[in-house]
Amino acid sequence: MQIASTYDLFIHELGEIYDAEHRFLEGQEVMAREATNGDLEGAIRQHIEQTREHAFNIERVFNDLGQEPRREANEVARGLVNEAQEAITGAHTTDLRDCAIVSSVIKVEHFEMGSYRSLITGAQLMGRREAEQLLRNNMDQEEETARIAESSSKEILRKAMEAEGQRPESEGLVE
């Protein structure tokens, strides 16, 4: 796609996040099957439904702009999914696999939040209030998912360390 204007850039970035949501949906389905921590699996399954809604919201933004929804290859999303798959298949224990899954979720959510923030700014400056609200709804859910993953990562990592015979220290942990 040629990018000759800020509008073209917005459409390109919208297509990239649309592609990312589809890639992440596929990745989350694998993560949910592979997770052994019940809370982690439940959170992923809930976010799968949100991700479907995110893709639908993006389609609505495309329609609001008079465009057909289209995916633009998102190499960052592809890399994050590949990295997650490698970590999941390379984990030697179920506890380590859960650690790899939650780590991957956190990385993905932060990537998505940055993408949505940029798109929200573009929608604001173009005066596209409906598009702005749809994108903001997506971002808000991504932020909540990141908070959930970040808060559960400590417990999941602690469990893995204890299974390895390590005694986790609580000082200096990021909260």
Image (tube, grey):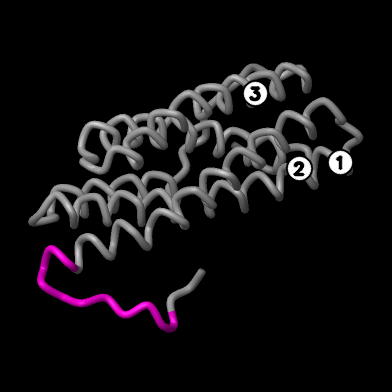
Residue 162: x and y, percent?
17, 67
For the view shown, which residue lies furthest in the bottom direction? 171
Q: Label 2 is placed on what type of residue?
A: Ile
Residue 120's disc number: 2
Residue designated by label 3 = 57
With 110 as the anchor, is 5 left or right in this view? Answer: right
Asked if the residue at tag 2 contacts the one at tag 1, i.e. Cβ–Cβ closer than 8 Å, the answer is: yes
Secondary structure of the residue carrying tag 2 is helix
Image quadrant in which you'd find residue 8: top right
> Callout 1: few (<14), some (14-19), or many (20+) C-alpha neighbours within 10 Å?
some
Q: Which residue is drawn at 57% across and 42% down?
A: 142
Residue designated by label 1 = 124
Secondary structure of the residue carrying tag 1 is helix
Q: Label 3 is placed on what type of residue?
A: Asn
The residues colored magenta run 162-172
Q: Report the Cα–Cα distance between label 1 and label 2.
A: 6 Å
Q: Report the Cα–Cα distance between label 3 and label 2.
A: 13 Å
